[in-house]
Amino acid sequence: MDLALDNKVALVTGSHRGTGQIIAKTLLQEGANVLVHGMTQQQAEDSVGTLGAGVPVWGNIVTREGSDELLAQCERFDTTILINNFGAADAGTWQSQDEDAWLLAYQKNVLSAQRLITGMLPKMAEMPWARIINLGTVGSTSPNARMPGYYAAKGALANMTIGLAKEVAGTNIRVNLVSPGMIHTPEVEQNYMRMAAKKDWGDTWEEVEAHVAKDIPIRRISRREEVAGLVAFLCSPMADAIHGQNIRIDGGQLGVVN
C-alpha cells in the first residue's frame, strides 16, 4: 500500500531509540523526510547513522530551553507531520513520588508535546494538510497503582489531544492519539525472562510470552513495528477521516487493567 508520504517532512521526537526510532525507520521507508530527534546532538546523529537516513535535530524537550532549541532547528523545514513520541516513566508509588516527581512526569509527557505543538501549529495551519500524532498508553484510561504521576500525565496528554482536535476542527490538520499496551522491547523481554527463571515459565521467549500474554486475546504482546505501522497510516492522506481519536493497540485487551 502506498501511503503517499513521499517527500513529506516528519518530526519524530525521541527517535534516537526504541519505538521512536522504529517509527522514524517506517516513515523513511515510506518515502518521508524524517527529522530524527535526540535529546542531545550525539544521540540524534548516532540514530541517523543507525537508520542510514534522516536529518538529525536535537534538544532536551523536557525543558522550555531545549524545546526552543529544537523548534529553531525545525524552522527551516516545512514540517507537515509532528509525532510526539517522546515520553518517559519513572518508577515509584503514591508514597514514594513527591510533588517534584509529579511535575517532572508532566514535563516529560505533556509539556514536551504541548510546547512543540504550540510552536509548530501556526505554520502547519498554512499547509495543504498536516498531521499531529501523540503517543499515549492504554494506562491513561486503565492505570496501574504504580507510577501514578506517569499515568496521570498520560491521561492529561489524552485529554489535551482531544481538545486540540476540537481546536483545529475545520482546518487541514488531523490530530490523533495512539495508545499502545505492553510493547515487545529488549528491555521488556529481559525483565520477563528474569521473572520466568523464578517462576519456571520456560527458557525461550516463545514459552515465556505465552505466560506474559495469557490475558491478551491475541496471546502475544504488540510489536514496535505494529505501532509504527499504525502511526504511519494515520500520517497518510488515506486517514483523512480519522480525527480526534484515541486508538488503542493492545492486542484486544479492552477494559483490562494493566
Image (cartoon, rainbow, N blue to C red):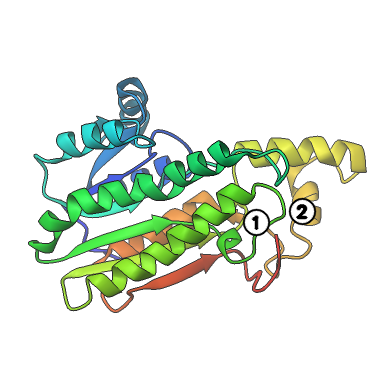
Report the residue marked by disc 1: 221
13 vs 89, left or right, is left
Q: Is residue 11 or residue 117 the one in the foreground?
A: 117
Report the residue marked by disc 2: 212
131 vs 206, left or right, is left
Query: Quarter holding the N terminus?
Result: bottom left
Residue 116 visible? The answer is yes
Residue at the spot 57% in from the left edge and 41% down from the top edge = 99
Residue 203 visible? The answer is no
Q: Secondary structure at mark 2?
A: helix
**Amino acid tagged 2:** Val
Residue 124 sits in which quadrant?
A: bottom left
Asked if 183 appears above or below 253 in the picture, the reply is: above
Asked if 225 appears above or below 161 in the picture, the reply is: above
Q: Which mark is residue 84?
A: none
Q: Marks 1/2: CA distance?
A: 8 Å
Q: Secondary structure at mark 1?
A: loop
Task: From the top left corner, tell me how far across and down residue 202 is, in percent.
Answer: 86, 43
Task: From the top left corner, tell me how far across and down residue 16 is, in percent.
Answer: 39, 33
Residue 15 sits in which quadrant?
A: top left
For the view shown, which residue lies furthest in the front direction?
99
**Amino acid tagged 1:** Ile
Pointer 1 with pointer 2, Cβ within 8 A: yes
Residue at the spot 18% in from the left edge and 78% down from the top edge = 170
15 vs 193, left or right, is left
